[in-house]
Image: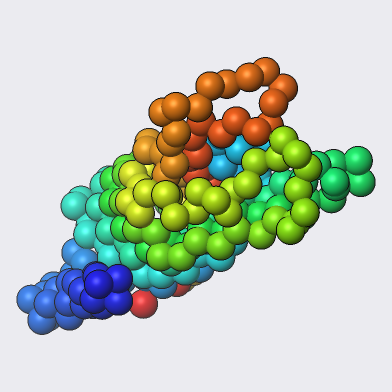
Amino acid sequence: MRLTTLTCCLAILFGIQTVAGQISRQQKSIFGLSALAGVNLTQVDGDNFAGFDKFGLAAGLKGIIELNRHFDLNVELIYSEKGSRFESAQSIARGTKDRQIKLSYAEIPMLLVIKLKAPDATTSYHLQAGVSVARLLNTRIEEPTIKAPLEFDFSSIKDEFDSTELNAVLGVHVRPPGNWGFGLRYSGALTKFYEDPDAAPIAGNREIVEFLRNFQLSLLMTYRL
């Protein structure tokens, strides 16, 4: 099912570009296609640790619909690695991070783009805002085999992670002359991928995990195809 979904999304993105080229042989196309790749800096709200300490990869395709000279609509298909990296009870004193929640997603961001460019400028600046629907592809938990008595076991709940996620997305993208571009993007989950309605919070007790929710910063490079 997951492979079929990805194949269909890729076909749609390539189909937009192909059909647009056939329709607009005599005029400039309002459709475009870009490849994108970059790095995610991620954290999980609710794991009782703070900081964008986990690195992950991001790569995919971006379909572009030019609405007018001020606005674009982007529809993307991205493979995105999220999660968190933090200390176990044994490693807190050493300051090392030996526990990880590794999550791999297929994402479809849908973004409205505001294009800012002076009449005589060759570089354009794009402001992006929208939502992203993500589908969980793979989950991996890395943590010490031997845990402290009150340390939470994330491996015990990984099968309860929600497979679908909705995110709010904000970003800025810079397009110098040519086909290359680069940008910074912030994404925050509007939904939790884990929630325990019976959990009772206790101050200073890391044993309690009420919910888990993704947040990320992405540094992306794009190339107009």
Residue 98 on image: x %, y %: 77, 55
User: Looking at this view, is 23 or 200 the one in front?
Assistant: 200
Residue drawn at (72%, 35%), measured in percent from left and top?
150
Residue placed furthest toward the left: 23
Residue placed furthest toward the right: 94
Residue 71 on image: x %, y %: 26, 47
Residue drawn at (14%, 74%), measured in percent from left and top?
20
Q: Quadrant of the C terminus?
A: bottom left
User: Looking at this view, is 42 or 33 the one in front?
Assistant: 42
Residue placed furthest toward the front: 149
Residue drawn at (60%, 44%), measured in percent from left and top?
43
Asked if residue 145 can be seen in this view, the reply is yes
User: Looking at this view, is 103 or 170 the one in front?
Assistant: 103
Residue 133 on image: x %, y %: 31, 51
Compared with 86, 179 (above or below) is: below
Quarter-of-image position of residue 224: bottom left
Quarter-of-image position of residue 143: bottom right
Residue 196 on image: x %, y %: 44, 33
Asked if residue 123 can be seen in this view, the reply is no
Compared with 23, 36 (above or below) is: above
Position of 73 compared to 43: left or right?
A: left
Compared with 156, 138 (above or below) is: below
User: What is the image's colouring?
Assistant: rainbow
